[in-house]
Amino acid sequence: MFCPTKLKTLEKAVGDAYNASKAADAAFDDAYAAWDAAYNDDLAVACAAYDDAADAWSKADQELKEYKESNSKTMLIKWSRIMNAVMKGSVLVTMLATTLLLLASAQASASGTAVWGGTSSTYTDGCQFKATTVGTMTLLDGTWTVTTPASVKLKTRKVLSVTVESDDILRDTSGNAVTDATVNYSGSTVSTWSNRTSLVSTVTASKIEVDGLKVKGASKFYINIGGTATVDDDELDSATAYKINHTVTCTQ
């Protein structure tokens, strides 16, 4: 059944609801506008704070760079001054050392020479027999073997060579020939008794030869005569002393 009163009530309710919706929309719009204004204000404040901070950082960074550059130049200037001082000192030391060397050289070149003059004695050219030592030998089966070499100590002047040779004769103590003897000088030696003497020695079975003697001054050396001598022992007497001679010849 249609009721006019009910219809009005419903229409009024719809109208009230619509008005409430409009009011809510307006309130929302007001709230949004208030939020937007607040957001923009806060954003502006934040941006301003950021800009201030960025400006402060840039200024501080610039000051740091200027400080480093200033101090770097100062240290470079100081280091340059130090190196200049060192170089000047080195130059002074070099000049002083050079001056001292020049002075020393001048003093050395200014020295003189003192001389002692004199004339040497008159020396005899040839061979001087300073000493001779008799050697010893023992016999076994017809061979005499030297156990202690005979030694000749010589001093020579203007001598070309010295030789030692035997006449290959076994003699008694009086010098009389007894029998032939084949001498072998192997084992003989030549040695110097002066550090200033140099020579060349050659030893063969039949000869000892010394060459390369000094032309000026004296040569001093030993000839040590060793070796063996083979004889016919049937020509020998029992328990009898014998000898073999060796001739030393100097060639001028």
Image (cartoon, helix red, strand yellow):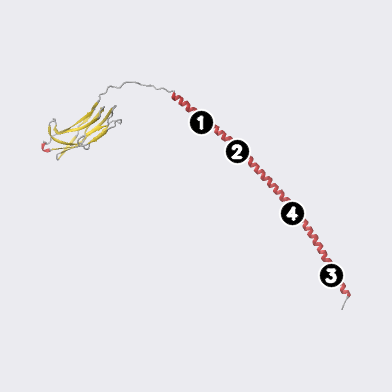
Q: Quadrant of the N terminus?
A: bottom right
Q: Amino acid at mark 4?
A: Leu
Instruction: Specify which label sits upstream in the sequence, 2 or 1.
Output: 2
Q: Position of residue 10 (x, y in %)?
A: 85, 72
Q: Secondary structure at mark 2?
A: helix
The answer to which of 219 and 153 lies nearer the viewer is: 219
**Residue located at (51% from left, 31% from top):** 94
49 vs 88, left or right, is right
Residue 226 tag number: none
Residue 117, image x and y in percent? Answer: 34, 21
Compared across the picture, whether 38 is left or right of 83 comes to: right
Sequence-first disc among 1 and 3: 3
Q: CA distance from mark 2 to mark 1?
A: 27 Å
- SS for dot 4: helix
Numbered circle sitting on residue 14:
3
Mark earlier in primary sequence (4, 2):
4
Q: Name the amino acid type tagged 1.
A: Thr
Label 4: few (<14), some (14–19) or many (≥20) C-alpha neighbours in 10 Å: few
Q: CA distance from mark 2 to mark 3?
A: 91 Å
